[in-house]
Amino acid sequence: MRLLCAVMIFVVATISMQGQRIASGPMVGHATMREVKVWVQTDKSADIVMEYFSDSLPQKKYRTEPSRTTKEKAYSTILIADSVQPGNRYLYSIFLNGKLYNLPYKTTFQTPPLWQWRGNPPDFTVALGSCVYVNETRYDRPGKSYGSEYEIFTSIHNQQPTLMLWLGDNTYLREADWDSRTGIFHRYSHTRALPEIQPLLASTHNYAIWDDHDYGPNDSDKGFYNKNITFDAFTTFWANPGYGFDDKKCITSTFEWGDVQFFLLDNRSFRSANKRITGNSEILGDEQIDWLLQNLASSKATFKIIAVGGQTLSSAAVFENYATRPVERKKLLDGIEKENIKGVFFLSGDRHFTELSKMSRALHYPLYDLTCSPLTSGIHTKAFEEENMYREQKTLVMEHNFAVLAFSGDIKNRLMEITVYNAQGKKKWTTTISANDLK
């Protein structure tokens, strides 16, 4: 009888092991010249290893340290490729419980080139967008589905961008989600498992900020009672360069690729309530603005890209635009001007439409803010009624869309070409900004 029980336990365990699978990912995250992060999620606890090799030296293979996925982290883990060299492209494979896990799409990552003192910075592209709603009927509001045109992720993947910037509202927490860890981690897992998104995750370096819907309820602020859990979820599901500054618990970070430095800001953790009457009216907060100005002032990057969840430059004081907090916005923009910081360009999401804002300044170069939204969520079809005095003509897009920034040229003549596409990959508009015009 004991022998029979032992055999049955072995058989059940074997079946369980065979039933394990990758639930979502792998997703390529932050890359430096010597390390690359790759995130992966399984459907139950499993041992994960990544094998990788340079496409120029396929006979030399490396493996990451093994990692075990656990329920505490939604059965996800971040693997570190630490045997890489600058300027190489690598192919990688995932081993699940010691066996190669076959994936139906290409899995590859790359490292930034070591170009300083050696030549011109690399040409590369960055895709971006915001507002990802993936339907789940039992938790959605009744009526017409809010999410649609998931094929947009195939269109983005077809562009083969080097990087992808997710500009907030990367998932939409529902009423049944945000009051529990179970609900929050379920929502993040459900969105991340969308089939159309997997090829993009597996071969493009992904970076993210958050906005209200992946931080908490609509228009949520620093008083949100479950912000520690959503912070845990965000840091679990993204493989950013880091999180926070000066011991501040937030999602703020920065990274470089070539001669471009990206600043990923947190517009929720320091935000005062929209309807609060007394006290400072803040979005980024004094300490985060000071951190940003310090890093902008020390940056040697040609372009300094600042990513914020909501619109920074729009003159329309509506919803959660920075124009509704004029005192703090003035402090930020005055700081950039007083420090004579060159090459600044803002990115934003949130608004469910796309537009390019251009703010002229008397003694300095103009500031730009590219708002790009939505990817799959509802569309603001009356955006044309907003009186944004800085909106560039013919840049308003009121359909599902994404943008691609293409950086090119020699070090003295660097260009950033902006192109906006709809969900089917059709070009909506394009413009080019020279780094020399941002000095």
Image (spheres, helix red, strand yellow):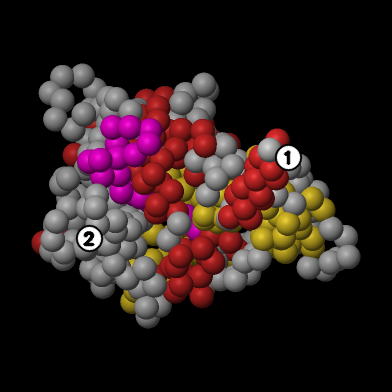
Question: Of all residues shown, which one is farthest toward the top?
Answer: 279
Label 1 is placed on what type of residue? Leu
Label 2 is placed on what type of residue? Tyr
Q: Which residue: 55% across, 45% down? A: 44
> Relative to 40, is 319 on the left or the right?
left
As helix, strand or loop, the secondary structure at mark 1 comes to: helix
Q: Check residue 358 for magenta coloring.
A: no
Report the disc number at residue 146: 2
Determine whether 258 is above or below 35 in the image: below
- The reply to whether the C-beta atoms of the residues labelled 2 and 1 are less than 8 Å apart is no
Mark with earlier residue (2, 1): 1
Residue marked by disc 1: 3
Q: Which residues are magenta?
A: 164-183
> Relative to 103, is 235 on the left or the right?
left
Q: CA distance from mark 2 to mark 1?
A: 56 Å
Is residue 169 visible from the viewing direction of this image?
yes
Q: Which residue: 68% across, 56% down? A: 94
Question: Where does residue 202 sit, x and y in percent of width and height?
Answer: 58, 61
Quarter of the rendering containing residue 329: top left
Q: Which residue: 34% across, 74% down? A: 422
As helix, strand or loop, the secondary structure at mark 2 comes to: loop
Crowding near the residue tagged with mark 1, few <14, some 14–19, many ≥20 C-alpha atoms within 10 Å:
few
Question: Where does residue 209 sit, x and y in percent of width and height?
Answer: 43, 45
Report the mark closest to the observer, 2 or 1.
1
Task: State the quadrant of the N terminus.
Answer: top right
